[in-house]
Amino acid sequence: MAFLLKHTNFYFRVGENPEDSTRRMLEGLGVRVTGSQMIPLSLSGGMRMNIFIELQGKQEDDIRFSLDNHTGYLCVPTTVFVGNPEDSPPPTPIPPKTIPQVTNQVMLNSFRAMALELSLDFWGTVVKCNLQGMAIPTENRGMMYSGPALEDLPLTPTELASLKRHLGL
């Protein structure tokens, strides 16, 4: 039976075939690719990729570390399994991500309300999420929030639930 090795995001150059590129990269690490699956995420063309490998005597942790170092321009969420595709579990649906359609100021207000509710340091939480650009320079406060998705912020489940609640989500 195939087992999960790593969830990651691979980044590819525009126009590059993600399956071929990933196969070349993994074979360069000394593993054998036994199969791949491109899975549509939406009608707008987003894709997710499952790759199946045999370790060929390589250590799982070495492969996990190497998978984090492939970069480029086009992001494809990827799951790497050890084993054959026939043995794999059915694809796990990726839950939708939330990018609220609000201004940066509304986001900052929601962060402040969350921080007050949970006795957190407001600005420290904004910085932890690397979102200080919402407030600095001041002109950015009136701009629309452009991401990252709330679920991708380094917040605890309690913090995320509070932030969503204060955003009216």
Image (cartoon, rainbow, N blue to C red):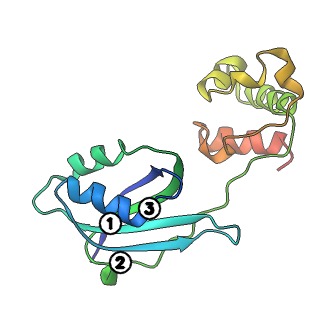
- Return the x and y of residue 112 as percentages of the image width and height: 79, 25
**Residue 137 pos. (x, y %):** 79, 15
Comparing labels 3 and 2, the label whose residue is closer to the camera = 3
Amino acid at pointer 2:
Ser
* Front residue of this view, candidates 14 and 19: 14
Image location (x, y in percent) of residue 161:
71, 45
Name which residue type carries label 1.
Phe
Q: Is residue 117 left or right of residue 125?
A: right
Q: How far, Cα to Cα, is label 1 from label 3?
A: 16 Å
Residue at the extreme right of the image, as rendered: 142
What distance separates the C-alpha of mark 2 from that of mark 1?
8 Å
Q: Residue at x 86, y 19 (%)?
A: 139
Q: Nearer the viewer, residue 121 or 129?
A: 129
- Quarter of the image holding residue 20? bottom left
User: Marks 3 and 2, how far apart in space?
Assistant: 20 Å
State the SS at label 2.
loop
The circle on residue 88 is 2
First reached walking from the N terminus: tag 1 or tag 3: 3
Q: Which mark is residue 44?
A: none
Which mark identifies residue 81? 1
Nearer-N-terminus badge (2/1) = 1
